[in-house]
Image (tube, grey):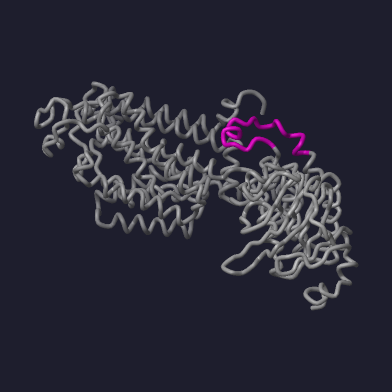
Amino acid sequence: MMLTKPDPQHTQLYLDGVSVSFDGFRALNNLSLIIMPGEMRAIIGPNGAGKTTMMDVITGKTKPDRGTILFDGDTNLTEMDEAGIATLGIGRKFQKPTVFESHTVWDNIDLALAGRRGPFATLFHRDGADDDRILAILETIRLSGRRDVLAGALSHGQKQWLEIGMLLAQEPKLLLVDEPVAGMTDAETAETARLLREIAQTRSVVVVEHDMTFVRDLDVKVTVLHEGSVLSDGSLDHVSADPRVIEVYLGR
Amino acid sequence: MQGGILLPRLDRAGLIFGAVALGLAILIPILNLIVPTDSAFHVPPHVVALMGKYLCYALLALSVDLVWGYCGILSLGHGAFFALGGYAMGMYLMRQIGPRGMYGHPTLPDFMVFLNWQELPWYWLGFDQFWFAAIMVLLAPGLLAGLLGWLAFRSRVTGVYLSIITQAMTFALLLAFFRNDMGFGGNNGLTDFKDILGAPLQADGTRSALFAASAIALAFGFILCRWIVRSKLGRVLVAIRDAESRTRFLGYRVEQYKLLVFVTSACMAGVAGALYVPQVGIINPGEFSPANSIEAVIWVAVGGRGTLIGSVIGAVLVNFGKTLLTNALPEIWLFALGGLFIAVTLFLPRGIVGLWTGYWAKRREKQAASIATQPVTEGS
């Protein structure tokens, strides 16, 4: 889409020429991608297209072999660890819902709340100081009634929402969401789309998803990944009509 | 919920435990020292020493539970921290012997005279002072745990690999302390202690005082652990145990948390060792034996991991069983211990305390079901 090299200034997330190899396998191949502040973007692509690896390099789990990753236009993410990147304002939702199963719903949100993260800060943290913030988030994710239930006892869909709530509690500027509706019922899927759109009003969101109905529900710009780089992007209708996309992905 | 941060976390469990330990610290010395020998309530001195030993083991178990039960770090080397604390205390006790040793040398312990050493090695300096030894009791295990933890946690060594490293650490120390030229008495270790803080170690009063000190140390350890696990830090620890990478992506530096709790735990184990040595009268490299560390883990598993009180119960019960069994049938103890571990893993995965809390939870559920017209079900 873009012919000249774009200016990273004013972007929320800026990936340029990012490559990662595992034992000779190129998981990401010269990947370039720009997310603007407040933008919501859906990423689709066949298995092995590099969607999860892309999340890994952005969040610091994997170090790229080459390339630039900038946050807020000037912060170089490739030199930071996961905790540092998270504190910067990037939240990540895993493919499999990962919540703290032996903590209550309330404590899950409490642990995720933006705040000081050092061991001594938490050791001397005063309980009850953040109750209002937690209540507000529980309201948003519709789990107010289950605040004292252990997270392990929640249904699959509720765990996904709890995890989204934890991300909200982090107050990130950018949310990376990996297959949020996998294994959800149709009603839960629709509810999740609504929840994500609500969240996207105040921050940038990147959603990786297989479910085409869900992507259509989101109604945002779509980027198609293939073999570790961008194959096509634009509206869902536009990429669906792209013959290269049909060949590698939708046509099968 | 408002107010200071120290008092609200001193909950009922901590208070009860503290009260019971303090009660024992007063009661047992009275029963030993004041109640006449022919009374049925008299506690003979060897029983006081035995119970003091159990309490030291309980403190060691508590320290294992803090790292394993709450942070998922299965340390198979906590015996090393216990032994280091023990050696620090042993060195103080050796220096207290002074010229009363077999060879009558004014400063050198007997084994050094025997090895023809001319002067005290630098690392023995200062151990004639109790305060110095007391600091080393915390510092030696703390530094070792800090170094090992720093290296292991920042390289993200977890699970069974970390267990193996800790096991290797205690084995390496075992071999090192066996060597005469290490200057810690080699094979024989440190023994023939005479007195502590000027009080003769064999005296009933000293034994009772050591017992009381062990009970108080255990109470302090328990309250400290309670305070840690009930804080937000404690909840982060459980979060690390259950979903480490999730915790990391929330912005917590997991390695700092693990290091802090590992060092705290090692210091507790060191205190346990330091109180243990004067009560048993000897410290030798055998205390570094990997089997000791594994045994401590079994105590915690038997009592109930991640409950604190379970580790204390497990340590006391298993060691009581050990005392009985090694008197009656010494050769089957290790088989019994192994069998116990298998049985607990298979039938009591949450230990004795888990059995107890499970029983009460079921009873409450039954009561709730009989009261409510509709049974309450938790979706899962």
Q: Is residue A5 left or right of residue A75?
A: right
Image mark count: 0
Of A3 and A177, the residue lying toward us: A3
Q: Quadrant of residue B278?
A: top left
Boundaries of the magenta span: A115-135
Instruction: Give me the residue at 55% from left, 31% from top.
Output: B12
Of B66 and A4, the residue lying toward us: A4
Where in the figure is residue A67, as x and y percent of width and height? 67, 56
Q: Is residue B27 magenta?
A: no
Q: Is residue A132 magenta?
A: yes
Q: Is residue B69 above or below residue A125?
A: below
Q: Is residue B53 above or below residue B331?
A: above
Where in the figure is residue B149, as x and y percent of width and height? 45, 44
Where in the figure is residue B283, as x and y percent of width and height? 25, 39
Q: Quadrant of the N terminus of chain B?
A: top right
Q: Is residue B190 left or right of residue B349?
A: left
Instruction: Give me the residue at 86% from left, 65% from top.
Output: A213
